[in-house]
Amino acid sequence: MSEEAPRNGRTGLRLIVVGAALGVVLAAGAGFGMKVTDRRPFCASCHIMQEAALTHKASTHANLACNECHAPHNLAAKLPFKAAAGAKDVYMNTLGRPDDVIHSGQSTKDVVNANCKACHTMTNTQVASMDSKPYCVDCHRNVQHMRMTPISTRKVADG
C-alpha cells in the first residue's frame, strides 16, 4: 500500500488566497453595481421613472445621483431599503401601470428629509422656522423634481 504524502500547508494557503481574491472581486462587483444603480441613467431606464429623471436632469440637484437623496447613506440601512424600493419599482413596471406616477411612501419621505437636512446642515442652523413643517419639501416644493412647476415653464434655475 502506498501512503499519501503529508500535506505541507500549501493547500490551505491556496484556499485562503483564492477565497480572498474571490472576496475582492465580489466586493468590487457589488460596489460597482451599487454605484451604477444609484444613478439617473439606470433609474430612467424604467418607464415609471422617466419623468422624474427628466426633471432631475434640469433641477438644482442634477449633479447628484438619485440615491444620494432617495436612499439612506449608511450602507447597512441602504441595502435593504434599496432592495425593497427596487422590488416596488419592478412590480410597478411589470404588473402595475407604468404610466402612473410613483408616490413616495412614508419611509422614503423620511429618508429624503434626513438627507436634505444632512447635506444642508449649515442652512438649517440659519433658518429659524425649521420645525414649522415636518418635511423640507413642504416649503421647498419645486426642489422635488420641480413637480409643482408646469413642464412648459420649467427652467434649469428653478429649484
Image (cartoon, rainbow, N blue to C red):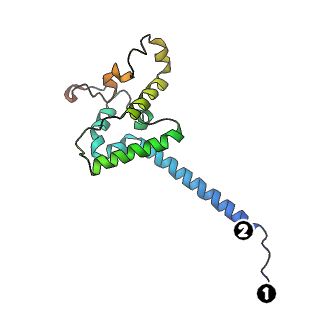
Q: Can residue 157 be seen in this view?
A: no
Q: Which one is in front, 80 or 59?
A: 80
Q: Nearer the viewer, residue 39 or 76?
A: 76
Q: Badge 2 local density, few (<14 within 10 Å), some, or many (20+)?
A: few
Q: Quadrant of residue 151?
A: top left
Q: What element carries label 1?
A: loop
Q: Disc number at residue 46?
A: none
Q: Mark 1 points at which residue?
A: 2
The residue lying furthest to the left in this view is 152
x%, y% of residue 66?
Answer: 40, 37
Few, some or many C-alpha atoms within 10 Å of disc 1 (few <14, some 14-19, many ≥20)? few
Q: In this view, does 116 lie above or below 18?
A: above
- Residue visible at 35% across and 23% down in the picture: 137
Placement of 6 over or under 9, stated as above or below: below
Between label 1 and label 2, give the one nearer the viewer: 1
Q: Quadrant of the C terminus?
A: top left
For the question of whether residue 11 can be seen, the reply is yes
Q: Image quadrant for the N terminus?
A: bottom right
Residue 10 as seen in the image, left or right of residue 132: right
**Numbered-mark total:** 2
Q: What element carries label 2?
A: helix
Q: Which of the two residues, 30 or 86, is positioned nearer the viewer here?
A: 86
- State the residue position of label 2: 11
**Which amino acid type is shown beneath numbered disc 1?**
Ser
Q: Where is residue 46 in the image (x, y as percent from the top left)?
A: 31, 46
- State which quadrant residue 152 falls in: top left
Among the two numbered marks 1 and 2 on one chain, the one whose residue lies closer to the N terminus: 1
Residue 127 is situated, as x and y percent measured from the top left of the image, at 44, 12
Instruction: Give the CA distance from mark 1 to mark 2.
Output: 21 Å
Q: Residue at the far front: name it.
A: 106
Figure check: 66 above or below 14: above
